[in-house]
Image (tube, rainbow, N blue to C red):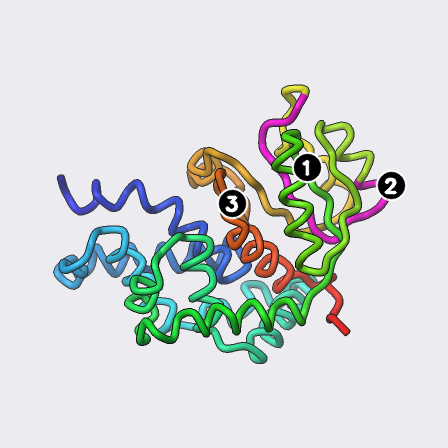
Amino acid sequence: MSLGQQLAPHLPFLRRYGRALTGSQTHGDRYVRATLEALVAAPDEFPKEVDPRLGLYRMFQAIWSSTNYDETPENSGASDGDDQESIARARLARMTPLSRQALLLTAMEGFTPEDTAYLIDVDHSEVDSLVAEALAEIEKQTRARVLIIEDEPIIAMDIETIVRDLGHDVTGVAVTRDEALALAMEDRPGLVLADIQLADDSSGIDAVKDILAEFSVPVIFITAFPERLLTGERPEPTFLITKPFQRSTVKAAISQALFFDSATVPQL
């Protein structure tokens, strides 16, 4: 099997990580593209002493560490984009980037502390403290009102508990597309957590489209089939959680989504 064939199954998840790390589909995908270009240009530099997934993320980390793509707005004439970039840069300046990387690599991508240490080039004894630092700092910075779109009662209750444990409020739990839009319009949320398949066979994706047509809000999708939303063939989510999920994964995704959102309010 060629190296390309070995890496292909991991690319959707690398895109997920890049987007969560940068808070942007465009910036995250740009880092992934730069990683693949580096691999094509110098295939002999691909780490051979580790499994392909770990080697792929290691190359991505090298690109992330050596460039500043996400520090320059793509379109200086777009004031909304400039505001978003300014907010992100201001928050990044108050936080150690390694801590955010450690949090996402362990909680969202499922790497062990040892693998995470290898990826971000620190001693493995530092990883736990970096993760704790990331959670503490992000949770201090953000607070939001959250709409949950989930038709499985047990999962919805679990998500609601996680959301409240983080200090956020829940505006409601919707189980259908129509109910989701109605709840969103009745009490405008600052974050949406959405399953893909809903109770009446309607789509959580369509529910989110309905809401975004009315106002802008960060969204985290939750699905058992993340690869279906990470094909590169259409607009895709910036934040994506895979079912079955760990509580730490949901916490990391919520914190990161709010970290880059201009509507969040500092904790007092």
Tell me, for residue 149, which label it has, or none: 1
Q: Nearer the observer, disc 2 or disc 3? A: 3
Element marked by disc 2? helix
Q: Nearer the observer, disc 2 or disc 1? A: 1
Disc 3 and disc 1: Cα gap in Å?
Answer: 14 Å
Counting residues from the start of the chain, the first of labels 3 and 1 encountered is: 1
Circle 3 residues within 10 Å: few <14, some 14–19, many ≥20: many
The quarter of the rendered structure image containing the N terminus is: top left
Q: Nearer the viewer, residue 110 or 40?
A: 110
Element marked by disc 1? strand
Residue annotated with mark 3? 241
Q: Which amino acid does label 2 sit on?
A: Glu
- The question of residue 189 being in magenta is answered with yes
Q: Along the horizontal axis of the image, is 64 left or right of 196?
A: left
Q: Look at the image and give the residue range highlighted in magenta.
A: 184-199
Q: Nearer the viewer, residue 246 or 64?
A: 246
Counting residues from the start of the chain, the first of labels 2 and 3 encountered is: 2
Q: Position of residue 54 (x, y in %)?
A: 27, 56
Q: Where is residue 159 in the image (x, y as percent from the top left)?
A: 64, 45
Vertical position of residue 233 compared to residue 167: above or below: above
